[in-house]
Image: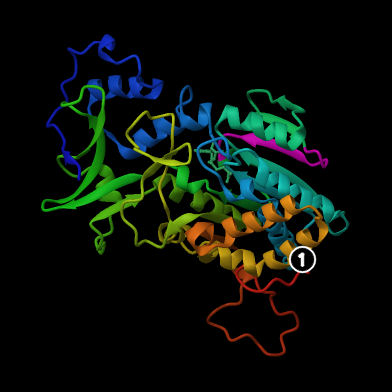
């Protein structure tokens, strides 16, 4: 467990030349900062490592996919995105087919998920024919937005003038306008379907530890024993974050809080409350029970979070109980339910059967079965990933009122979290 922080950091005296040349750019930057101003929060460390504008992991690499550092469900199988596309269409139908909707994805990675969703929209064009669909991507990484542009538009994009909320625009291969933003606040309001797949787990967390003297925040500092290495320390007294984020009734000894996730889910809830639509959040996580989940991945291997920052993906489990709390009753919430349950309810078995029947070569069939197993097997992604949704209150039956037996149009169940009506 972390050692106590030095009472004050020995700033000055150390020169830039003492920073080893083998250190990553983010580490060099951090070592100078730590020496000058003392330890930083884990959140600040994580933000530097992942999204530092010059050298962050996502800014420069974002190694998603088989050749990268981690693989996500949309990269494993096209079926994943297709079923999510069907989820949105089913919600659109259930709310009376509004004239227009925006699909808003947070952290789209390589763009595969939106690509699969847009393919479904295009296949179901007869249903959507009178609906004005647009896509809005929230992405901070220039490198990944480039990959998304290539995947979704074939590279046909234009940078937007600086004073416009979107930084880039293009048209999808299926003819749908796409805009890119750095912040959810820049996305136009209106009836929208939001999507966050493996997004919230990449946002910076604060870490806290219970001690005999009360709660202390875990910080990142240099290691006086080993010159160019980082280590965890405990704040000598409580920090503003300790005061704000630890509940008096907390029973765990170690807690992780992601305030940025709280702010973003609140924004989504406000938008859905006001303009309608829905949000689907899929991620690994827990319901306020886990403690120490902060970890790194590099080349598909666990990686020491404090080593070579900027070269590995850093992540922490999403605390769905915290997200639910931050929604503050503005919308209804469903889940979290396990990925295997959600995909089963969405009809993954039937979709697999159709794809197997349509493919004649053994290698493709093998691949289909393998990816199905990755997504559904409880020991793989089936139980580790969860689905969580925000919906306007009027979309769900009032739990206090008994559904009137002869009510004219009973509300259809929400797909994925119940049975699928759209066949
Ligand atoms: N959803 C994709 C990618 C997950 S990786 C998939 O499942 O394959 C996380 C994504 O979030 C990356 O695209 C990363 O660049 C982006 N990201 C991380 N922090 C962000 C932030 N603060 N704002 C917007 N995007 C962010």
Identity of the residue drawn at 45% across and 33% down: 50
Q: Is residue 34 left or right of residue 274?
A: left
Identity of the residue drawn at 26% across and 30% down: 230
- The answer to whether any part of residue 403 appears in the image is yes
Is 227 rendered above or below residue 415? above
Q: Is residue 370 left or right of residue 1?
A: right
Q: List x then y, in percent, for residue 212.
A: 11, 53
Q: List x then y, in percent, for residue 232.
A: 24, 38
For the residue pair 263 and 1, the one nearer the viewer reads as 1
- Give the extent of the magenta segment: 172-183
Identity of the residue drawn at 72% across and 48% down: 116
- Confirm whether the magenta stretch covers residue 312: no
Which residue is identified by label 1? 96
What colour scheme was applied to this rendering of the protein? Answer: rainbow
Q: Is residue 375 left or right of residue 347?
A: left
Is 358 rendered above or below residue 404? above
- Confirm whether the magenta stretch covers residue 177: yes
Quadrant containing the N terminus in the rendered view: top left
Residue 392 position by quadrant = bottom right
- The answer to whether any part of residue 273 appears in the image is no
Q: Is residue 356 left or right of residue 219?
A: right
Quadrant containing the C terminus in the rendered view: bottom right
Q: Quadrant of ligand 1?
A: top right
Q: Residue furthest bottom?
A: 405
For the residue pair 37 and 58, the one nearer the viewer reads as 58
Q: List x then y, in percent, for residue 359.
A: 80, 55
Question: Which class describes the residues within 10 Å of circle 1: few (<14), some (14-19), or many (20+)?
Answer: few
């Amino acid at each position: 467990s972390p050692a106590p922080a030095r009472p004050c950091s020995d700033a000055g005296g150390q020169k830039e030349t003492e920073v080893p040349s083998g250190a990553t750019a983010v580490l060099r930057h951090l070592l100078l900062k730590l020496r000058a101003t003392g330890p930083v929060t884990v959140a600040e460390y994580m933000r530097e490592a992942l999204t530092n504008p010059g050298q962050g992991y996502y800014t420069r690499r974002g190694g998603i996919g088989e050749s990268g550092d981690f693989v996500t469900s949309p990269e494993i199988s096209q079926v994943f995105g297709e079923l999510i596309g069907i989820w949105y269409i089913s919600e659109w139908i259930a709310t009376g087919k509004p004239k227009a909707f925006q699909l808003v994805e947070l952290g789209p990675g390589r763009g595969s998920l939106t690509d699969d969703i847009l393919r479904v929209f295009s296949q179901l064009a007869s249903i959507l024919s009178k609906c004005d669909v647009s896509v809005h991507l929230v992405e901070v990484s220039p490198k990944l937005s480039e990959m998304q542009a290539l995947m979704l538009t074939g590279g046909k994009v234009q940078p937007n003038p600086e004073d416009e909320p979107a930084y880039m625009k293009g048209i999808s291969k299926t003819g749908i306008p796409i805009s890119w933003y750095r912040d959810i606040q820049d996305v136009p309001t209106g009836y929208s379907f939001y999507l966050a797949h493996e997004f919230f787990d990449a946002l910076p967390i604060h870490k806290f530890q219970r001690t005999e003297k009360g709660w202390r925040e875990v910080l990142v500092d240099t290691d006086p024993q080993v010159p160019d290495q980082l280590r965890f320390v405990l704040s000598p007294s409580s920090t503003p974050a300790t005061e704000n984020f630890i509940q008096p009734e907390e029973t765990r000894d170690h807690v992780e809080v992601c305030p940025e996730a709280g702010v973003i889910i609140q924004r989504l809830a406000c938008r859905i409350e006001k303009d309608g639509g829905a949000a689907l959040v899929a991620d690994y996580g827990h319901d306020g029970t886990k403690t120490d989940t902060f970890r790194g991945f590099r080349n598909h291997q666990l990686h020491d979070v404090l080593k070579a920052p900027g070269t590995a993906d850093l992540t922490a489990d999403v605390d769905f109980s915290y997200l639910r709390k931050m929604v503050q009753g503005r919308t209804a919430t469903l889940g979290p339910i396990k990925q295997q349950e959600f995909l089963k309810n969405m009809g993954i078995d039937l979709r697999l059967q159709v794809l197997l029947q349509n493919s004649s070569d053994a290698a493709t069939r093998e691949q289909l079965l393998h990816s199905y197993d990755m997504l559904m097997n409880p020991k793989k992604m089936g139980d580790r990933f969860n689905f969580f949704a925000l919906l306007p209150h009027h979309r769900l039956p009032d739990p206090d009122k008994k559904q009137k037996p002869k009510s004219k149009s009973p509300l259809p169940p929400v797909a994925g979290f119940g049975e699928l009506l759209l066949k």
